Image (cartoon, rainbow, N blue to C red):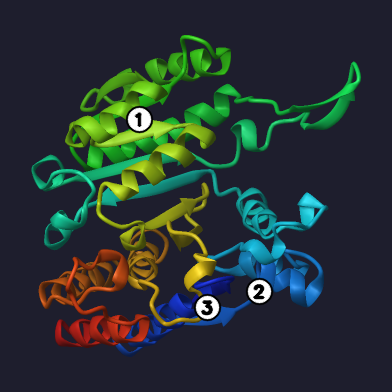
Amino acid sequence: MTQKVLLLPGDGIGPEIAAQAARLLEACQNAGLDIEVEEALVGGSAFDAFGEPLPAETLEKAKAADAILLGAVGGPKWDKLDDLSKRPEKGLLGLRKNLGLFGNLRPALLYPQLASASSLKPELVAGLDIMIVRELTGGIYFGQPRGIEERNGERVGFNTYVYSESEIERIGRVAFEMAQKRGGKLCSVDKANVLEVTILWREVMERLAPEYPDVELSHMYVDNAAMQLVRAPKQFDVVVTGNMFGDILSDAAAMLTGSIGMLPSASLNESGQGMYEPCHGSAPDIAGQNVANPLAMMLSVAMMLRYSLDEPTLAERIEAAVGDVLDQGLRTADIAQPGEVHASTVEMGDAVLEAFAKRG
């Protein structure tokens, strides 16, 4: 049966890297993948066209899709919009909420060819392979009440950090099952020494642990976890945490790999539908220059094939093709060493497609 893929190029470098993903999807179709690809607007580009960061038409197409590929959203052009509900990021949050995309998978995998590009010593990061499982639709980003109001003659900003047992259990099960498929170690990150929400978080994780006897569960406060990521990152296998802590830690882990431009991510709901996107954001400072690294976007296609479209063989073929290209010495500016020639976005896309074809 034909599966539907929705491509959302978005803003900044999004359209440039999405174009390379579209070429890769076409190559997969030529290799026998039965998909139908549609495009739609989201984020700042959608606001410019429709006055909304998540138009109803885009949301309906997203709901009907088996998987969604997102480039990136946001940029300084829209940062001064007074109505926060109109900002590009609200389009992304709206997709997550409306589709129930509660489970965010953020791998921090170091390609051996790029060990020297990491900001840490190669011996600390060689062989690094961490999976951060971040809860994505709850916590302080969505909690109510929230706002800015006047109290006692001054403005006060407030947000509510809230998680229910069912929300914690749902993401916990995703993380335990991921650990079963990997190294059997799960570190739950919280701040249970000062936050009641994360006291509950820790209690639920402990309650789940006996159901997964093959997984070793540990706990770590978030400040210590941040320190350990840069001190001894290879101690981690799977990390599970809430929305805000996961947002911060996953970006820190990404930079251990040399460039956030190398890392894909997946956001899944309970039915297996997923939204796949690179971790790097819209990078408006380099948009339109044909210098952005498309590899995270192309690896997001591989994650989509693995987790939503049940095509692990094609996923492995894409990942191997990326490895082949790195073996050839091709580097975009973000992963190049001083003196190395920089490949453009399109040149890197060309090379991956060529390597993909050779592995057919």
Q: Secondary structure at mark 3?
A: helix
Marks 3 and 2, how far apart in space? 10 Å
**Disc 1 to disc 2: CB gap under 8 Å:** no
In this view of the protein, can residue 66 be seen by the observer?
A: no
**Residue occupying the point 52% across, 49% down:** 269
Whichever of labels 3 and 2 marks the residue nearer the N terminus, that label is 3
Circles 3, 1 touching at the beta carbon (< 8 Å)? no
How many other residues sit within 10 Å of disc 3, few (<14), some (14-19) or many (≥20)? many
> At x 31% / y 65%, what residue is drawn?
334
Residue matched to label 1:
226
Judging depth in this view, the residue of 314 and 188 nearest the camera is 188
Instruction: Locate the C terminus and report the quarter of the image it occupies.
Output: bottom left
Question: Which residue type carries mark 2?
Answer: Leu
Residue 15, label in figure: 3
| The one of 157 and 109 positioned closer to us in this rendering | 157
* Mark 3 vs 1, N-terminal side: 3
The mark lying in front, picked from 3 and 2, is: 3
Neighbor class of circle 2 (other Cα within 10 Å; few <14, some 14-19, many 20+) is many
The quarter of the displayed image where residue 225 is located: top left
Residue 135, image x, y percentages: 50, 38
Residue 312, numbered circle: none
> Comparing marks 1 and 2, which lies closer to the viewer?
1
Q: Is residue 5 left or right of residue 256?
A: right
Mark 3 and mark 1: Cα distance apart in space: 33 Å
Classify 67 as above or below 119: below
User: Residue under circle 2?
Assistant: 41
User: Mark 3 or mark 1, which is nearer to you?
Assistant: 1
